[in-house]
Amino acid sequence: MKYKINIKSLLFLLYILSSTLVFSQNSTKFKVVLDAGHGGKDPGTMRGNIKEKDIALAVVLKIGKILEQNKDITVIYTRKTDVFVELRERANIANKAKANLFISVHCNGVKSTAAKGTETFVMGMSRTDTNLDISKKENGVIFLEENYNEKYKGFDPNNPATLLGLKILQEEFLNQSIELASDIENNFVSKNNRYSRGVKQQPIWVLDATVMPGVLIELGFVSHPEEGAYISSEGGKEEMSSSISNAIITYKNKFYNTVSEVETPTQVSSDNSSTVDNNSNTTESNNSNSNKVYYKVQICALSKKVATKSSNFKGLKPISFEKEKKIYKYFYGKETDYDTCKIKLEEAKKKGFTTAYIVKFTN
């Protein structure tokens, strides 16, 4: 009986993922959700007067202040004060905002005073004892919540069936998450002279429940005398927030800066000198259409290539795509008249592509 319930839950989660897969690529601004771990009645890791919840909040606020200086970035916080926020609510905040990125900030702590270093986690299947200890620690806040059995039933990092579900749900975003995590760790080493324990994969609930690329950052060990002093100092917080912000901006520029979203005709900025229409298998170059202007409806953007047959796009055709960096952007139609393209936009939205928008191409 339990097996049937798990399958139904998995199918429901897969449906939610398929419905929201394009959230992260189709928002007007690049949205970042900053999640300060723990808070309120949950102090997190502690050592003397050093509390994980305080360090995480301070660093998140500093990251937000840096990112908010960029007019193309919208910052959303799961908490800005010392309050307890359930894991489920943290994920809900990110999903409701249709965010492009989820960043959760934490600190480490163990009995030994020798352990040190930064590490950044992405959703994954690694089952080493060390990583499972981290997973259990970050997931452990679940048990502080009321009715946790009902809210999180079916999630068990030690259950192979749960791990299978997590793997399927996060496959689309894993590569992007790993790239961001690598940049963060590289910045810690090159800019802050920190010791890095690397990028790791682990089944952590809050990363699983957010339908977008995301990472959980462990800033260091409060249990290590020198590192604890550094990550709790004002200078340490400034340096770490700068390194994380830099990685986020690099990520945004890498994946999201190549196409402009428009409600009225606006030229697309692109590094490509030609547009490939995969239905006609022809290439339109600048030489043959130097002043050609046309419009398409962008219906989604994915991290993997999908066949452009209409059955994959709810019956819409023709479908074409462009690959920009590591993102495949899929378009419906191709019109020289903007008003005609608006009709196709409405058709796409009626088919369920509610975040679709018009893009103008000029060779």
Image (spheres, helix red, strand yellow):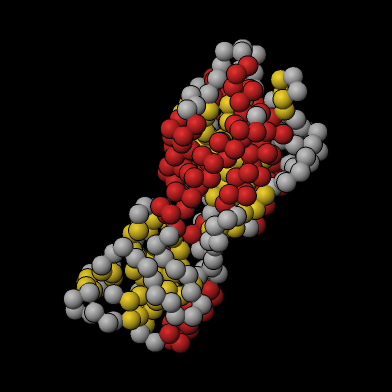
Residue nearer the viewer, 238 or 323: 238
Side of 307 relative to 280 (left or right): right
Q: Is residue 98 above or below residue 297?
A: above
Residue pictured at 78% horizontal, 40% vertical:
82
Residue nearer the viewer, 86 or 258: 258
Where residue 286 sits, quadrant-wise, is: bottom left
Side of 248 relative to 271 (left or right): right
Residue pictured at 76% horizontal, 43% vertical:
81
Residue 73: x %, y % from top left: 55, 58
State the count of labels.
0
Residue nearer the viewer, 169 or 251: 251
Residue 357: x %, y % from top left: 49, 72
Residue pictured at 67% horizontal, 49% vertical:
77
Q: Is residue 207 above or below residue 70?
A: above
Residue nearer the viewer, 315 or 131: 131
Residue 169: x %, y % from top left: 52, 46
Where residue 70 sits, quadrant-wise, is: bottom right
Quarter of the picture holding the C terminus: bottom left
- Evaluate whether residue 240 shows in this view: yes
- Evaluate whether residue 333 shows in this view: no
**Residue lying farthest front?**
235
Residue 46: x %, y % from top left: 72, 23
Side of 272 relative to 93 (left or right): left
